Amino acid sequence: MDSGAGLDKVCLLGCGISTGYGAALNTAKVEPGSNCAVFGLGAVGLAAIMGCKKAGAACIIGVDINPVKFETGCVKILVSFLALHLFWLQIKLVTN
């Protein structure tokens, strides 16, 4: 790893990405043709989406309550990169 890489950025590789990716492949054991939903589109959620894609998921639904998550460059790049049926669902909290 480049010694100039900032630890505040590199730490995502050792934690968020391996957690999300591993959750899809090792815990959920996503199979080819599966339909998946990923709740939360932060580092872990985006990595889980990558893991679902690697496992051959046919449809991945990304769910988050934060509308900003759907507008970030990372999500747009990921959608373009995956080139599959990927849907975004924004959940709005309803309170009385």
Image (cartoon, rainbow, N blue to C red):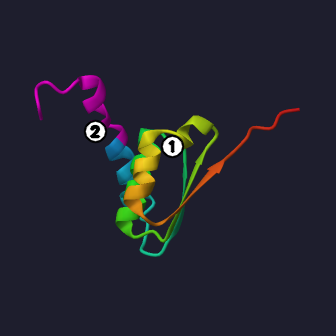
Tag 1's secondary structure? loop
Looking at the picture, how far across and down is residue 71, in whole percent? 53, 40
Q: Disc 2 marks which residue?
A: 13
Q: Amino acid at mark 1?
A: Leu
Is 73 colored magenta in this rendering?
Answer: no
The crowding category of the residue bearing disc 1, from other C-alpha atoms within 10 Å (few below 14, some 14 to 19, many at least 20), is many
What residue range appears in magenta?
Answer: 1-16
Tell me: 67 left or right of 54.
right
How many numbered dots are placed on residues in this image?
Answer: 2
Residue at 11% in and 31% down: 2
Tell me: 79 left or right of 89.
left
Q: Nearer the viewer, residue 77 or 64?
A: 77
Q: Is residue 66 visible?
A: no
Tag 2's secondary structure? helix
Question: Spatial distance from mark 1 to mark 2, Cα to Cα?
Answer: 16 Å
Looking at the picture, how far across and down is residue 68, in whole percent? 57, 35
Is 15 colored magenta in this rendering?
Answer: yes
Tell me: 96 left or right of 63.
right
Q: Is residue 63 visible?
A: yes
Residue at 34% in and 44% down: 17
Looking at the picture, how far across and down is residue 13, in whole percent? 28, 39
Q: Which mark is residue 41?
A: 1
Quarter of the image where the C terminus is located: top right
The crowding category of the residue bearing disc 2, from other C-alpha atoms within 10 Å (few below 14, some 14 to 19, many at least 20), is few
Mark closer to the chain start, 1 or 2: 2
Quarter of the image where the N terminus is located: top left
Q: Amino acid at mark 2?
A: Leu
Relative vertical location of residue 8 with respect to residue 93 in this rendering, above or below: above
